[in-house]
Amino acid sequence: MSVFSMLKSAHKNVACVMVFLFVVSSLSGCIAPELKTMPTSTPAPTASPTTATPTMTPMPLGEIAPPSQSVEVLERYYEWEYDRRTWTLDLSIPESLDGYYRNKPRPATADYSVYVTDPHDDPYLKLVVEKFEEVATTQKYDQYKKACFVLSFVQSLPYATDDVTTPFDEYPRYPIETLVDMTGDCEDTSILAAALLDMMGHDIVLIELPNHMALGIAGGDEFYGTYYLDNETKYFYAETTGTGWEIGVIPDEYEDGYATLHHIIPKPILTHSWNATRTRTIFSDTVILAVRVENVGTAQASSVKVTAGFDAGDGRWYNPEESDAFELGIEEHKNITLTLKTPRNKYTRVVIYIVCDGRVVDKSTSIWLQT
């Protein structure tokens, strides 16, 4: 049985990738699940989608010669079942690319689309996606079956919680990290599946549920099952953890919950840190705030402001101050200083808001104090 490989520069001028994707035997089935805001359901057709006739013959997927043999790589092998076949995938992942993401801070956000839209892994993932596309073309898969094919690969990765596989209680992985680790929890596999399917041209959302993350895939008449309706588009629920889940099938525990849909587009993600110095004289009592605002997202932030004051309860302020508006590019930061007049004889705390385009995107408070 022949093996077809691919090796190409993927990250700066030192990255490379080797991909082997081929059929090794006949076997069975498709996998993936469902979607909401509250979920709706489309009836299944009377007959399930047709499947290609299984064959024992490996399919040639082409070869790209490596530009250099000196690049350090991490070898990974995967095996999974789809469409009554057993598929295998061999990856040679550049150590430099994996190291870049291991050293990258985790953005402080529940919108994990930022992990999908980071551009540094795009050349590598594009090479992987091309191999899935070639198989889909050869097998004459429609959009539904292409999505099932990719999901079957992602669902085959063993589930493991972050506190078991990392030193952290919560550690969202970038797609390259999940490929290297060959495991992950719900947000890790959802991020990986979203990255692959988005690159294949599918309209994808990440579905944030209480204590869970899943995928939403925009579908037409060939899709059926549970979906979320967003701007007149049906996003069908897709579970990425564990085998056996079909697109449009949602686990019972998530059927009745509301969900937040995160579209896969570059977005600014703003975080901040601060320190305060209180200055008291016979004539004045002030707090000088030094605030550092950082954009850890994948798009420029416009009309950013820092607003701060003392908490007066019920959403009211004592002596609020606001900075001038500013912009923040990707991975840029800005230091802002605000001087707050301290209210007399109040039990209060300092409240800081980071505002972007008129919307509060980050917030912090001091401890309560008696002024």
Image (cartoon, rainbow, N blue to C red):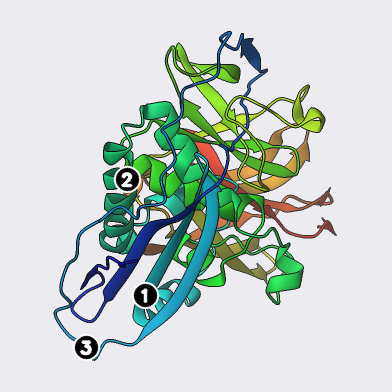
- x 54%, y 64%: residue: 106
**Pointer 1 residue:** 92
The label nearer to you, 2 versus 1, is 2
Query: How packed is label 3: few (under 14 Cα within 10 Å), some, or many (20 or more)?
Result: few
Can residue 134 be seen at all in this image of the molecule? yes
Quadrant (top left, top right, bottom left, bottom right) of the N terminus? bottom left
Q: In front here: 111 or 24?
A: 24
In primary-sequence order, the first of circles 3 and 1 is 3
Q: Is residue 277 left or right of residue 371?
A: left
In primary-sequence order, the first of circles 2 and 3 is 3
Q: Is residue 368 depicted above or below 316 in this figure? A: below
**Pointer 3 residue:** 69
Query: How packed is label 1: few (under 14 Cα within 10 Å), some, or many (20 or more)?
Result: many
What's the residue type where badge 3 is placed? Gln
Q: In front here: 208 or 34?
A: 34
**Pointer 2 residue:** 135
What's the residue type where badge 2 is placed? Val
Q: CA distance from mark 3 to mark 1?
A: 12 Å
**Labels 2 & 3 near each other (Cβ < 8 A):** no
What's the residue type where badge 1 is placed? Ser
- x 76%, y 71%: residue: 164
In primary-sequence order, the first of circles 2 and 1 is 1
**Labels 2 & 1 near each other (Cβ < 8 A):** no
